[in-house]
Amino acid sequence: MSGGGFGWLVPPKLSPGATIRVIAPSGPLETRLVWRGLGWLSERYDVRFDRGIFEATGYLAGNDARRREELAKALIEPGVAAVICARGGYGASRFVHELDWSSLRLWPRWLVGFSDVTALHVEATGLRVASLHGPNVTALGRGDSRARASFVEAIENPDRHRSFAGLEALVLGSASGRLCGGNLTLLHACAAAGRLRLPDSTVLFLEDVGERPYRLDRMLTTLRTGGHLAQVAAFAFGEFTDCGPGMDGVSVLDVARAVLGPLGKPIAAGVPSGHGVVNEPLLLGSMATLVCEPGGATLELSPP
């Protein structure tokens, strides 16, 4: 189902005591960290989960049927304010296209996570429903007080204005639009599957982990050549963890300039979100303004 022609919906903000459903749609879990994350969440919210999240089938958190049914139920479960993924990894894209996502328009709720969870964010974006690119339960279980505070602030006050200053300006200019995106590898996969539906004037956020620059070049080039970036007004690069140059010396930012620079759209780097030590929550669907000047760049996010 496409959200074309629909206005954006923002799920209700959470308050202490709100009901959260935890799911594992992707890879198997690090049990200790997930239990710690569940414990911390339970101190503030009514947390629900099935023991099936701890199943492991190779590199998946149980078989496709288990993970598909868990997500499908979470999208329609009465009273659930947020669906938070236990971790990323791989696996959600094996079945998200089979679900009836129209329920997310009928009963909006926050979808929270990053990395492989980008597949879920893409479905929400297609329906024009805001979602939260942010820490999963595993990350919250690491005990980082700053990350936990940022999570609470983002999900309980999604109507707050946010600003990221001091970014690196790669291509000068300014543009405004809807903040969308997530993990580049997943966005590339979603485009190949025909699921990527970006709104007009998108400010596209990108991050990744463990990809050599030439592979990032391949993905960006394919997205550009395939017309998937036609609606993009600006690019905001986040953390590209363990994506350093090889023997050729070409960096991620070199790739960004070479592949995306000719589009003439503003490009900034350094948004503190992704697989790095700091993973600031980003409300996808926010109204975003990216200003890239000779002295640096600033990303301003306003409520949807």
Image (spheres, helix red, strand yellow):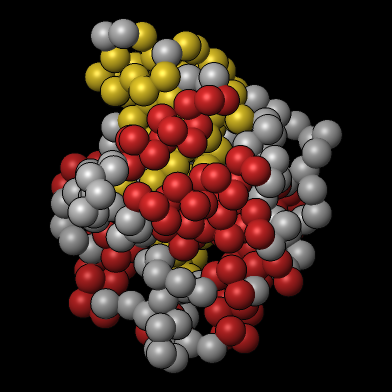
In the rendered image, the vertical position of residue 217 relative to residue 4, given as above or below? below
Residue 103 appears left or right of 20: right
State the image coordinates of residue 277 (x, y, percent, origin top left): 19, 49
Residue 262 in the image: above or below residue 71: above
Q: Residue furthest top?
A: 294
* Visible residue check, residue 42: no
For residue 178, above or below residue 108: above
Please state if 195 lies on the left or on the right of 173 as rendered. Answer: right
What is the x, y in percent for residue 274?
33, 47
**Residue that protrudes farthest toward the front in the picture:** 248
| Front one among 1 and 74 | 1
162 displayed left or right of 218: left
Residue 37 visible (yes or no):
yes
Which quarter of the image is occupied by the C terminus? top right
Q: Quadrant of residue 3?
A: top right
Residue at 23%, 45% in the rendered image: 249
Name of the residue lying farthest toward the right: 5
Residue, x 48% and y 26% (percent of image)? Answer: 261
Q: Give coordinates of residue 282: x percent, y percent.
A: 42, 38
Q: Nearer the viewer, residue 9 or 274?
A: 274
Tell me where residue 281 appears, x and y as whole percent. 37, 41
Quadrant for the N terminus, please: bottom right
Pick the front one: 264 or 168: 264
Residue drawn 25% across and 49% down?
Answer: 248
What count of labels does the image hold? 0
Above or below 171: residue 109:
below
Residue at coordinates 25% horizontally, 19% vertically from top-left?
A: 166
